[in-house]
Amino acid sequence: MGSDGGIFSFGSAQFYGSMGGRQINAPVVGMAATPDRKGYWEVGSDGGIFNFGDAGFYGSAGGLRLNKPVVGMAPTQDGKGYWVLAADGGIFSYGDAHYFGSMGGAHLNKPVTGMAATADGMGYWEVGSDGGIFNFGDATFMGSMGGTPLNKPIVGMAGAYWEVASDGGIFSFGPPFYGSMGGVPLNKPVVAMMLPRGGNGYWEVASDGGIFSFGSALFEGSMGGNHLNAPIVGGASADVSG
């Protein structure tokens, strides 16, 4: 997914529409897939939500005055709601997404760059660009990179849980380490990571659309080497196996 809302699909991922080529008030910064992978949401830095396929619209922060821009989102287990995350750690919950607290209004050493929900949807983690982890609800703290010198900032997280840095480095807390692009020269920085349904691997995606696959995550194509109208800012898995 590009910052213009354009969607590129590979393998079993179906295209259900996008904001690519359409006027948007703010750049798109993140996306999430529905549980059956028959739809997806895009979220803009202003908190606007765009839904496609069987993804329902449950509200948005678009039109609200935000203290800091939105940086990502996460869906609930049944896809009937979602959380929207701002760079100050503020959380906005919609549909059946419950609010369990946030870092909004608290002092942060570095801005928040990503989030992940627990498997039962009764909690979530936030991650800062310094690797610090903030846990809410039934999300358990299992360690973090906060306070540890990093070669590059953390740009996102996934599962329960991995952190990913812009140089492709992966830091695992709880789940296994399957490899990373850390230490490998990259054409462009990594911007996000995604999980296959079984969670026994992961993909990293770079801003030029390059995809790097590890563990059970299969490589099924990428936009690496192709002309893009806007940089890639995120992605979502279409894997429904496992």
Image: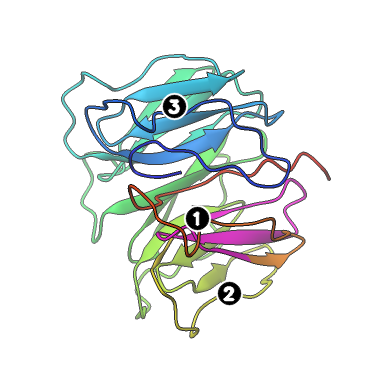
Q: Which residue is mark 2?
A: 180
* Picture quadrant of residue 120: top right
Q: Which residue is mark 1?
A: 157
Between tags 3 and 1, which lies in front?
1
Q: Earlier in the sequence, mark 3 or mark 1?
A: 3
Image x and y of residue 239, in percent: 73, 43
Query: Which of the pair 28/119 is nearer the observer?
Result: 28
User: Left or right: where does residue 196 sit relative to residue 30?
Assistant: right
Q: In this image, 9 relative to 1: left or right?
A: right
For the point 51% across and 26% down, the residue is 17
Residue sitting at x 34%, y 47% = 229
Q: Is residue 149 above or below residue 143?
A: below
The answer to whether mark 3 and mark 1 are in CB contact below 8 A is no
Between discs 3 and 2, the one toward the N terminus: 3
Residue 231 horizontal/vertical position (percent)? 35, 53
Residue type, mark 2 in image = Ser
For the residue labelled by badge 1, is the local secondary structure a helix, a strand or a loop? strand
- How far separated are the C-alphas under marks 2 and 1? 13 Å
Asked whether the viewer can see residue 72, the reply is no
Q: What is the crowding at mark 1: few (fewer than 14 residues within 10 Å), some, or many (at least 20)?
A: many
Q: Mark 3 = which residue?
A: 99
Element type where label 3 sits in the image: loop
**Towards the viewer: 87 or 143:** 87
Q: Which residues are magenta?
A: 192-212
The quadrant in which residue 99 appears is top left
